[in-house]
Amino acid sequence: MQRGKSQQALPYLLWLCDNGSIYAKRNAYRNITLYHIQKMQWHDALKYNNKAFDAVDSIRKIEGAEAVARVKANYDYSLYKIENSDLKVNNARKNKIIIILSAISILIMLFIFFWWKSIKLKSQHQIELLNNMKFLHESETENILNEKLKVTEELHAKITNLLLENHSYNEKVNSLTDYITELENTLNQTTAQLEDLTSSKQISDNKLMSSEIVGKIKRNISDNNFNLSYNEWKALEKSIISNCPDFYKKLHPDRFMSALEWRVTMLIKIGISPSNISKMVNRSKETVTSIRSRLYAKVFKIEKASARDWDSFIRSL
């Protein structure tokens, strides 16, 4: 914020503090802090600086909830990929083995063919030399022998090159096999980590479901006149925070939920059906459905949302 325009911008910044989005509030708090620092009003500067930090903390927690949703989506997608990956990997491996074996077979056949051809040519050439040696001069015989040696050396060089090429191909096949094995190990490690996360969440959920307050709700839920007192609602909240601390920290309901919305969310967490939730909070089933869809839209910043999406999200935390 420029020094000359700070006084003019102050009313607008104060308005953003009351009416702006969380991101606008964060920027407004920061600029007001700078303004008070310029005016050497240290108490007010510290006050708005603390508010800026609170806004940043709120943004991080909201973004954390979004990250949890993305992780859930990635987890579902990874399960789908895992179901199909084994068949694809096996088919790909069979195809690669077939290609490799075919290539090796072709190389061996070519090697045998050229070797046989060279032996045959060599034999024919030797017979011709023997027939002509009777009529050739000693110098001519020496030239023929030198040519024979040259042909033999060339053939030996070709065979050597062919063997080297075959060795290089085998090294590439081995390297590819090691890479496939490494990918399989990585996949197994990822699967084990996902299973550990699922097991830890299951233990926390089991502790919550075996708590005294949840047991009482489950036993009396069929009673149409059953309602929780204020202290019992607090006991349910305390049980959720105690047994599922990550759930409360990731969701942080005091930041954006009303008391009614938080109660509906707690009942979803312990597996109460929407019809029973409506009885326990003294609201119609349509109102409960609207609350669930509105919460999902609020958290993930979308216009339209399904109530079931909110239920799935809460049960995944």
Image (cartoon, rainbow, N blue to C red):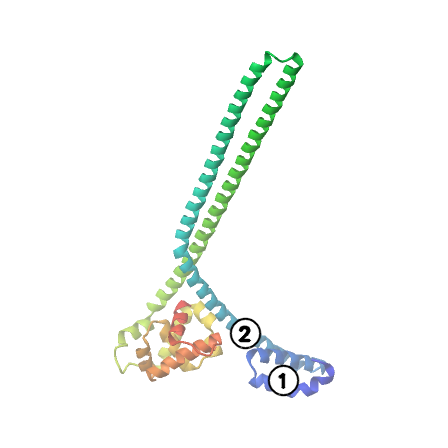
In the rendered image, which quarter is residue 243 located in?
bottom left
Q: Vertically, is 190 above or below 264? A: above
Q: Residue at x 40, y 80 (%)?
A: 291
Dot 1 and dot 2 residues touching (CB under 8 Å): no
Point out the residue furthest to the front here. 135
Where's residue 195, x and y in %? 40, 57
Left or right for 258, reference 155:
left
Q: Residue at x 59, y 80 (%)?
A: 24
Tell me, yes or no, if residue 230 can be seen here.
Answer: no
Query: Considering the numbered disc 2 on the image, is that residue within a helix, a strand or a loop?
Result: helix
**Residue type marked 1:** Leu
Point out the residue furthest to the right here. 4
Toward the viewer: 160 or 173? 160
Q: Vertically, is 71 above or below 161? A: below
Tell me, yes or no, if residue 60 can be seen here.
Answer: yes
Query: Considering the numbered disc 1 on the image, is that residue within a helix, a strand or a loop?
Result: helix
**Residue type marked 2:** Ile
**Label 1 belongs to which residue?**
13
**Label 2 belongs to which residue?**
59
Q: Residue at x 71, y 85 (%)?
A: 5
Q: Earlier in the sequence, mark 1 or mark 2?
A: 1
Where's residue 104, x and y in %? 47, 37
Where's residue 142, x and y in %? 65, 16
